[in-house]
Amino acid sequence: MALADYQPEVRVIQLAKTSFTVRGLSLTDVTTLIREHLPDLESLVDIAGEVVPDINNVTHDDLGRIAISLAEQAPGFVANLIALAADATDEKSVSAALKLPFPVQVKALVEIADVTFAEVGGVKKAVESIAGLMKMKQAQINRTTDQ
């Protein structure tokens, strides 16, 4: 398969009278979330850390607990995340994501996390890969400053 043929996996989020699809988050999506929620990032990490003390051993059940905590404590972030994953980032769509029933928001978050990490072997493998890249980058920075 050529890169141009790549289509991200999607999941259907069903509501009583309608549905929408979500896909995994890309690096562009993550940077958008960081840019829009930079002042809140430490709090968001703290929210996840309260639920999952060992980020290196995140399970599927942990994703559900993190999703519940985020939906309760960071509704604006959750709405933006859902809208990004649904490729619907206009103001009306973000507002609609804010109004989704709480269980639907949680389900959407879990599905988004699942599909985001599924192709790389799960959350644990993704965290290990990112941590490895960060260590390499830090080593590179240290070598540069030592010279």
Image: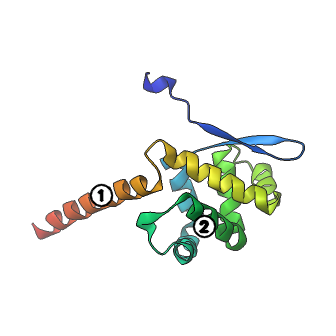
- Residue at 27 percent across and 62 percent down: it is 135
- Quadrant for residue 137, please give it: bottom left
* 143 relative position to 110: left or right: left
Question: Pointer 2: residues within 10 angstroms few (<14), some, or many (20+)?
Answer: many
- Quadrant for residue 66, please give it: bottom right
Q: Position of residue 100 (x, y in %)?
A: 81, 57
Give the amino acid at mark 1. Gly
Q: Is residue 25 visible?
A: no
Q: Where is residue 113 in the image (x, y as percent from the top left)?
A: 57, 53
Disc 1 on helix, strand or loop? helix
Q: Residue furthest left?
A: 147
Q: Position of residue 117 (x, y in %)?
A: 50, 49
Q: In this picture, is 112 found above or below 9?
A: below
Q: In which quarter of the image is the N terminus?
A: top left
Q: Quadrant of the C terminus?
A: bottom left
Disc 2 on helix, strand or loop? helix
Distance, label 2 to label 1, CA atoms, is: 23 Å
- Quadrant for residue 3, please give it: top left
- Residue at 40 percent across and 53 percent down: it is 125
Q: Which residue occupies the foreground of this view, 121 or 26?
A: 121
Residue wearing tag 1: 132
- Residue at 66 percent across and 41 percent down: it is 11
Q: In this picture, is 104 found above or below 57?
A: above
Q: Position of residue 12 (x, y in %)?
A: 72, 40
Residue wearing tag 2: 66
Question: Pointer 1: residues within 10 angstroms few (<14), some, or many (20+)?
Answer: few
